[in-house]
Image (cartoon, rainbow, N blue to C red):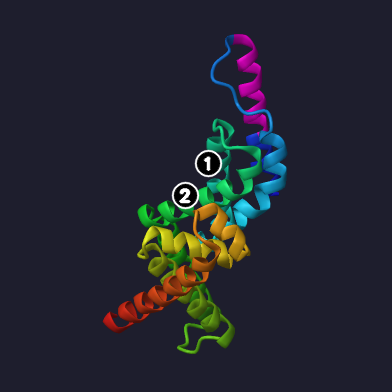
Amino acid sequence: MRHRRSASAVVARRAEWKDSAVVSSPPGVRADLEQVFRTAYPRVVAVAARVLGSRDEAEDVAQEVFLTFGRSTVPAGEALGWLSVAAAHTALNHLRTGRRRASREEAATRAATVSHEAAAGGGEVVSPDVADAVVTREERRRVREALARLPHRQAVALVLRHSGLSYAEVAAVLDLSPGSVGTTVRRAESALRKELNRHASSD
């Protein structure tokens, strides 16, 4: 349902821009926005969700990205690559500057633990399923925090590759030679592991 609301919001916004352009001729919104939106929306959300770990927040990022794209002059043939990079950049910026997601996840973790303990009568034992869920959530939080500390180019390359883009696609959108993409991604993965180990040892 959220996907439909997001899509409708952007398409409706495009219609408003189009109507206003007829009346006052402000800088217009590109005519192919709706078509590109329908084609690229799933990938844009997937890229942002890979960074943020939240579909709701990924859809918010997608709206930002498409609103920017709607006023851009990016060639239609480069739209998907441009949108993928923009989604990664925007999501990483949200990750680096916003604390809402981390706070919400911590609250959810505490709530899950408290809820289970209350159901168990306040005992010390936590169900393996609940414990696993808490550990998994904590691990994902650590990975996202480590990702946010990587050099921006490395982080974007890593996100795009793990979002399903081919080496050729990553090379094209980041203006890299195809042969250097694997090296960039491997360096990013190595840097990510070092960040995770460094902060794990300092906890």
Q: Position of residue 177 (x, y in %)?
A: 51, 61
- Residue under circle 2? 90
Q: CA distance from mark 1 to mark 2?
A: 8 Å
**Residue drawn at the location 63% of the way across and 48% of the way down:** 80
Q: How many marks?
A: 2
* Residue neighbourhood size for the residue with mark 2, other residues' Cα within 10 Å, grouped as few (<14), some (14–19), many (≥20): some
Image height check: is 32 above or below 92?
above
Q: Pointer 1 and pointer 2: residues touching (CB < 8 Å)?
A: yes
Say few, some or many: other residues with alpha carbon within 10 Å of mark 1 (under 14 / 14 to 19 / 20 or more).
some
First of labels 1, 2 by sequence position = 1
Residue located beneath label 1 in the image:
64
Q: Observer-nearest residue: 57 or 184? A: 184
Prevailing SS of the magenta stretch? helix
* Residue positioned most to the left: 202
Q: Position of residue 1 (x, y in %)?
A: 70, 49
89 up-or-down from 141: above or below: above
Which element carries disc 1, helix, strand or loop? helix
> Dot 2: what SS?
helix
Quadrant (top left, top right, bottom left, bottom right) of the C terminus: bottom left
Residue at the (55%, 30%) spot, across then down: 71
Q: Find residue 180 and report its horizontal and vertical position in percent.
A: 49, 67
Instruction: Work out whether residue 61 can be spotted.
Output: yes
Q: Quadrant of residue 54?
A: bottom right
Q: Is residue 2 visible?
A: no
Stretch of the chain drawn in magenta: 11-23
Q: Is residue 68 placed above or below 173 in the rendered structure?
A: above
What kind of residue is marked 2? Answer: Thr
